[in-house]
Amino acid sequence: MTPSQSLSYVQTPLRHVCRGLRSSLGRASPHFGSDDRGASAVLGTVLAFGLVISLLAMVQVSAVPAWNQQAEFEHLTDAEADFAALDESVALAADGRTSRATVAGSVTYPTRAFFVSPTPGVGTLKMTDEQVASIDNAVATGETGTYWDGSAKSFDAQSFHYEPSYNTLNQPTLAHEGFAQYTAYANGNETNEVGATQRLVDGTTISLVLLEGEMNTGSADPSTISVTPVSAGTDYITVTDDGTPITISVPTQLSEETWQNLLADEPNVQSLTYTEGGDYNTLTVELRPGRTYDLHISRVGINTAGSDQEPAYMVDVEGANEVVPAGANQRVVVEVRDEQNNPVSNAKVTADDDDGRVFVRGDGPGTTSTVTDSNGRATFVYRAQDSLDGVVSDEFDISVENSSGTEVDRMTFEVQVRENGVADPVRGLVANVYDPGYVYAESADGSRRQINDTGTGGDVVYDAGSDRLVVPPSVSTITADESVTLRGEGVSLHTDVITYDTDGDITVEANSGSFDAVGVSLTAGKNGDITVSADETVDLTGASVNQLGKGDVSITAGGDITLDSAGMTAVEPGEELSVESTGGFVSARNADLSSNGDVVILGETGVDLAGAGISSVKDNDDVVVESATGGINLNGVVMLADGDIDIDAETNVYVVGANIASSKGSADVVITADTGMVSGREPAISAKGDITITAATRISIPDASLDADGDLNISAPEEEY
């Protein structure tokens, strides 16, 4: 059409239509004749209708998808909130509490008049195939260490996935791997991840949560699923490395980059290794060595009660190494645990005792098998023999079977049976010590001869010469107005020794042999010294060694010295309490060593003062603990001094929960690990002077309380405090 063409010409086709309509109507009624007044109204209606259709089409193509995308986004927001609630339910189940969680179904698009909305999709809920997680090089303290011995431990692990069905958004997958959760979006050949969190490593806490289940279903409606503890508990076990760093390997679909970001601020993560696989990749976390970690492993069932957990090992709860009076009963309790370190119920436990002295509590003699209760525990009774001569060692075994009847663990319980009440000290660890009613010498060939007191004046002297001296339990307490001397090529003492007068020394000379005096009491009054020497070992477990006047206490051995649960005291100011092993180890766990003079503890190959109380609280006297070739364990120790405290180990110094204080003047606390580290959570160390902690490799004392009136000096290549 050209600009000169008339409008009537442009409308010619329409005019033809109107002309035909008029012609047909005109034949029916002459009134219509050539009247075309309605043509513009019809034209307007047609144009308006076309415009509406066009608008509807534009809205359907452009706006409706945007509205649908908004509905999908809101649905995804709800789904992610549901997954956050699911994560809380998993945490509850890991601690042993059952809960339920709701996961959104598929998105529902609103019904819109004149527009077409997609039909609701189907949200897919599924558990993935089993993969393998593992922990290697972890060694536990205490009896748990018989199972957690540094060898690799493997566990089955699954993940829970929710996949909504969307039409406009990139298809997301909401994933929970037990130890991590996140939302992943497929974007071509790449995957974008948002909202990722992890609980695998948190400071010195390791939490490995393992999921299991068989779910694989689709639903348009929201789904409520149960989250059930399959193997759970609130107890953590303490582990450290076996010389090689602890590693934790887990199957994951979370990317290496995201894991790097999640663990970037964890101070105890030494390195990450990421190995790509088919459906799953493997993340291996290597922890910093030389530190202690709290390990908690749990198994959580997703919409399933889960599989029965098999026994893996046992621990002693009560009854081991007890002292039982003749004819008395002793309760014996074991706890059966699975591979996740959690209690196992209904496990068969059997006592094995040839003499029939062990039986199930509540069932009476003759019944030796039972099953564990809901706490994984089984209780037995040990009945000691009615009469005996001296001290008798006895032992029995308790074993546990798996569901196939195969024995998986066995423990041996040792007890000491003796006459008299439990308040009396145990007179040695020698089973059925020969007791003729007098002091005797025992030669290497087993022959014996009586030894008489050869002391003069107020002294008491028992000398076995080249044989071992034995003072049996039936010998009454050895008392002297002046000194007591026990001498031989080894001394075995099973009764108490007391001196009363001035300069009333107590001297034990075991020479080339050992000195055993478990549970005895050595008490020197007034100005007497207490001196013990042996070329081999000294065992004063549970003994009481007290200098009540002006005198020193000195324990010296070429081999190990054992003072566990012993009490040693030097009362007068200026008098020294010293313990020295020139070629062995000093163990004084839970002992109480106190002096109003210096306290000196020297162990060539190491010193263990875990749980002990060490004090030197008079006249600015010092506490010195040293090991020339080994380490020093001060976990749980309480160490107080008016003077300086000097702790020096060749290798490592452990101070978990230690309380170390130098409280007067300008006294210092000095802790040195010459070639190793100083390690331990929550120690409390204070000094009126300086605090100096030095280590060759690292100092790791998180949550420490360090209070120095002088300078605080921390020096190591790696420091955490």
Image (cartoon, grey):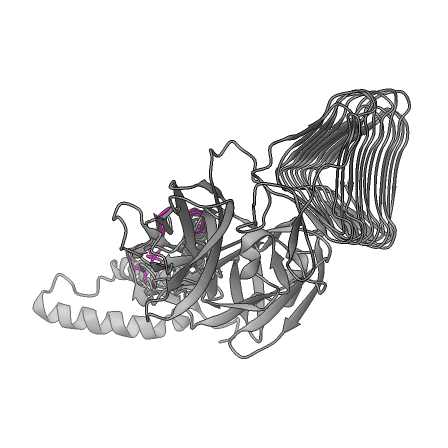
Expressed as whole percent of the image width and height from the top left, the position of residue 138 reads 62, 61
Query: Which residue is drawn at the image coordinates 71% and 41% (left, top)?
Result: 609
Judged from this view, the residue extending furthest toward the bottom is 278
Query: What x and y, as percent, mark residue 269?
Result: 70, 57
Q: Is residue 384 magenta?
A: no
As drawn, is 609 to the left or to the right of 362? right
Could you say which quadrant of the image residue 712 lies in? top right
Q: Is residue 114 magenta?
A: yes
Q: Position of residue 586 (x, y in %)?
A: 75, 47
Q: Residue at x 63, y 51 (%)?
A: 293
Could you say where residue 607 lies in the image, as x and y percent from the top left? Answer: 76, 47
- Seen from the viewer's position, the closer of residues 692 and 65 is 692
Q: What count of labels does the image hold?
A: 0
Query: In this rendering, is residue 184 above or below 596?
Result: below
**Snapshot quadrant of residue 153:** bottom right
Q: Is residue 719 visible?
A: yes
Q: Nearer the viewer, residue 90 or 289?
A: 289
In this picture, which residue range is highlighted in magenta?
87-116
Give the residue displayed 40% in from the left and 73% down from the top: 9
The vertical placement of 669 against 69, above or below, is above
Q: Is residue 54 visible?
A: no
**Pick the front one: 190 or 141:** 141
* Left or right placement of residue 219 versus residue 452 in this view: left
**Quadrant of the drawing holding the C terminus:** top right
